[in-house]
Image (cartoon, grey):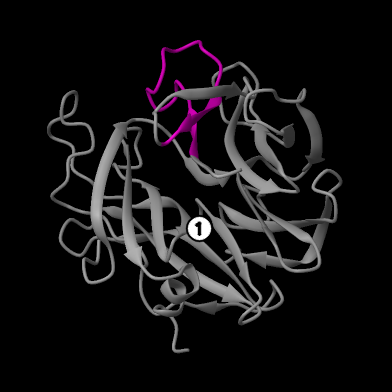
Amino acid sequence: MDRTIWHHIRHFKSNIGETTPFTFKGRDVCLFNVSSINGAQPKGKPDHAVIIDNETNRELARILDGHYFIFAYVANGKCYCYGSNVGYDGTWAADTIDMTVSEDLVHWSEPTPIFHYPHGHIFNTAVAFDGKRHVMLFETNDKRFIPFTFRFLESTDLVHWTLLEGPIYGDKKYVGGPSLYYFPQDGYSYVTYVNQFKNEETRAWNYDTCIARSKDLVNWEEGLRPILFPDYNHRPFPRKHPDVYEINASDAEFVEKDGKVTVFYCGGNQQGIADNARAEYDGTLLQLFHLFFNS
């Protein structure tokens, strides 16, 4: 972590998966993905997500049994959660995204399929509104590209989605763990993603989080340096794995409130041993992202 940018860095919840922090009707909450694959629960139990009240640490809901890579998006006074339908067989092999909706975070609609992809499995998703439409990014191992290439959908109602044929990102390199944001102030869509690189000392694969931006989702400008970097002195799960040190800072999600940005991300070793972490930046999210570009 670059401590000239980030401060109040805190690690919590060993071996819980990807998160979505968000504010819903004045309440600060966080969605956590839970799976037996990474040891967050006993084997044989279905993947799912839980939504936690940040102030009380109380569980508000458990949603989407048989799904993983679940992402929360707030619009129209509702919370829309999208997840890859991985089923109950203990794998992450999904080709369909399902949706559930709530107006209070407690009562949820029955899961509804909103998109099927015949060319490969679907993993993480992210959603943003670009002023005209909602855009969904999804991550796929489509064999026509390098895993895990990002493709894009569009929707005007968050229910009916259409694949965009032109926009794509990461078809020439390893990417993963995306987040997606749009800012009308500069007209850019920003993507953060997991970047794979060789550690100069160990020559092993390590993972940081980088950033790119685009005005059309086709032509992309790369950030000048990583936005998050592993803390090689940190042990993500010392109670059970005292010899494992962090080589990964991935799956970042950002939330802005009261002139401060909080990033939630996954540490660990990308081999099933992980923890959740968060850090703070003093400023707006757009100010933060601009630090990684020339303008």
Please indicate whether residue 168 sits to the left or right of residue 30 in the image: right
Q: What amino acid is labelled 1 in the image?
A: Val
Q: Nearer the viewer, residue 91 or 161?
A: 161
- The percent coordinates of residue 20 (x first, y second) are 51, 43
- The percent coordinates of residue 32 (x first, y second) are 48, 33
Tell me if residue 37 is in the magenta stretch: yes
Vertical comparison of 227 with 162: above or below:
below
Badge 1 density bin: few <14, some 14–19, many ≥20, Cα 10 Å: many
Residue 198, quarter of the rendered image: bottom left
Vertical comparison of 107 with 194: above or below:
above
State which region is magenta: 29-54
- The percent coordinates of residue 236 (x first, y second) are 23, 38
Number of labels in the image equals 1
Q: Which of 107 and 153 is in front in this view?
A: 107
Residue furthest to the bottom: 295
Q: Mark 1 points at which residue?
A: 175
Where disc 1 sits, the SS reads: loop
Residue 151, quarter of the rendered image: bottom right
Residue at horizontal 28%, vertical 69%? 5
- The percent coordinates of residue 277 (x first, y second) are 31, 45
Vertical comparison of 84 with 50: above or below:
below
Q: Which of 191 and 197 is in front in this view?
A: 191
Residue at horizontal 45%, vertical 70%? 284
Please indicate whether residue 266 sits to the left or right of residue 50 in the image: left
Residue at horizontal 29%, vertical 42%? 269
Tell me if residue 32 is in the magenta stretch: yes
Quarter of the image with the N terminus is bottom left
Please indicate whether residue 127 sits to the left or right of residue 3 in the image: right
Residue at horizontal 28%, vertical 36%? 12
